[in-house]
């Protein structure tokens, strides 16, 4: 194997360590939940290999346990995973010449893989397509391990697992905090936090409004508010990007 | 397997969820395969992710019953633990693990 590829694998292993940690904890949380609902360990393996979507698998535990209709499952999946459409948009150019590996990289495009791949600038001495591919592959392997360990624990060990579902909340709070701290430099509050603030604000408004109006799915209006706000804020946000580039 | 559930229906649901997820992930690559991506789409792809993560944080808290302090106080304390640990250590395993364990201990022992 050539040097650039070996370097890509090493770099991918090093950079995915935080995801290894997060996926292990989160996968165990999912596995335990699934097992406590009465599903055998192989279901955790099937789901983590085929769906491979963190938050959707948590939601899917409820859907499977309630044996919902296919239509309802489709609607929930679109709601929870619609954000992935936007991930792809920012990676079209990065993934353009990855060849056959592209198919796997697109299948394996989770929140965490996206956040790593989209923010990492690969240096010249590393084969970037191999790097993106192995980041995707390692992440899924960590996830499968976590899910199966959790399912085994849930099926074999008697313990009070109440509250384990908080792993998903903790994960997103952690990603949010990480992102907030990394874009601001030394400043805790700056113009670079506009997008994150819009996301939180729009969803809060939508949640409260939908509660008052008794609408069940607050994520759809929330997505619309976020889209419209970001489009309206484009002159401001584009200017900030230019300042960063200088 | 729960008594109300069959293996066949479970497999069907898993296949459907996996397929829809894949379609969503592949959509931009298929739609904008040839030619140039519209500038507004590129712009959204760049500024959207932080907003979506913010949305997901709120989504996670939306199921909590805010009329019962026993329900929301542990959730908020655990979130504070995640944030403070992350500012301090910047280690995802420590932040997520400690936050989750703290939440489990609180709802199982402190705020019953």
Image (cartoon, coloured by chain):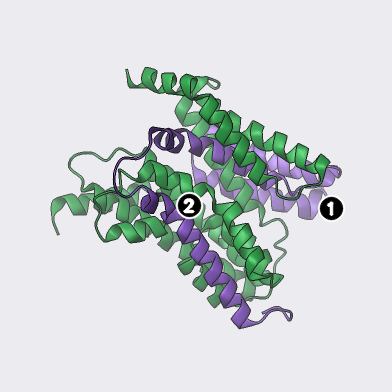
Chain colours: A green, B purple
Can you identify the residue that label 1 sits on? B112
The relative height of residue A28 versus residue A83 in the rendered view (above or below) is below
- Please give the name of the residue rendered at 37% of the width and 54% of the height, measured from the top-left corner: B30
Observer able to see residue A61: no
Q: Position of residue A194 (x, y in %)?
A: 54, 25
Output the chain of dot 2.
Answer: A
Q: Position of residue A200 (x, y in %)?
A: 63, 34
Q: Position of residue A54 (x, y in %)?
A: 54, 56
The N terminus of chain A - image quarter: bottom left
> How far apart in space, not on screen, are marks 1 and 2 (Cα)?
30 Å
- Please give the name of the residue rendered at 82% of the width and 48% of the height, measured from the top-left corner: B111
- Please give the name of the residue rendered at 55% of the width and 40% of the height, measured from the top-left corner: B52
The one nearer the camera, B104 or A193, is A193
Left or right of residue A183: residue A2:
left
The relative height of residue B103 versus residue B8 in the rendered view (above or below) is above
Badge 1 vs badge 2, beta-carbon distance below 8 Å: no
Q: Indicate the quadrant where residue B75 lies.
A: top right
Most distant residue in the right direction:
B67
Find residue A130 and name its label. Answer: none
Left or right of residue A204: residue A54:
left
Q: Residues within 10 Å of mark 1 (few under 14, many from 20)?
A: few
Find residue A21 and name its label. Answer: 2
């Amino acid at each position: 194997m050539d040097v650039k590829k070996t370097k890509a694998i090493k770099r991918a292993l090093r950079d995915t360590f935080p995801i290894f940690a997060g996926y292990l904890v989160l996968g165990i949380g999912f596995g335990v939940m699934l097992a406590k609902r009465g599903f055998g360990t192989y279901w955790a393996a099937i789901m983590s290999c085929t769906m491979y979507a963190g938050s959707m698998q948590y939601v899917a535990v409820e859907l499977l346990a309630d044996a919902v209709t296919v239509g309802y499952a489709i609607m929930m999946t679109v709601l929870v995973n619609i954000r992935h459409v936007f991930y792809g948009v920012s990676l079209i150019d990065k993934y353009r010449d990855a060849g056959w590996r592209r198919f796997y990289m697109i299948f394996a495009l989770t929140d965490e893989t996206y956040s790593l791949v989209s923010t990492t600038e690969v240096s010249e001495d590393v084969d970037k397509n191999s790097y993106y591919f192995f980041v995707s592959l390692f992440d899924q392997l960590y996830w499968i391990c976590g899910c199966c360990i959790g399912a085994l624990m849930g099926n074999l060990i008697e313990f009070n697992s109440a509250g384990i579902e908080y792993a998903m909340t903790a994960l997103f709070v952690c990603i949010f905090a990480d992102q907030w701290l990394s874009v601001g430099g030394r400043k805790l509050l700056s113009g670079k936090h506009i997008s994150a603030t819009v996301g939180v604000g729009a969803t809060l408004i939508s949640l409260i409004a939908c509660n008052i109006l008794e609408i069940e799915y607050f994520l759809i209006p929330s997505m619309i508010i976020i889209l419209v706000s970001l489009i309206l804020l484009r002159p401001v946000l584009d200017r900030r990007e230019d300042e960063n580039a200088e | 397997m729960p008594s109300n559930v069959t293996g066949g229906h479970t497999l069907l649901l898993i296949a459907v969820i996996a397929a829809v997820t894949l379609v969503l992930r592949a959509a931009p690559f298929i739609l904008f395969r040839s030619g140039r991506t519209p500038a507004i789409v590129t712009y959204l792809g760049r500024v959207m992710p932080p907003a979506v993560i913010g949305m997901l944080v709120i989504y996670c808290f939306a199921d909590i019953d805010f009329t019962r302090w026993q329900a929301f106080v542990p959730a908020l304390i655990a979130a504070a633990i995640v944030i403070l640990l992350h500012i301090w250590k910047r280690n995802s395993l420590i932040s997520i693990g400690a936050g989750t364990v703290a939440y489990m201990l609180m709802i199982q022992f402190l705020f019953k």
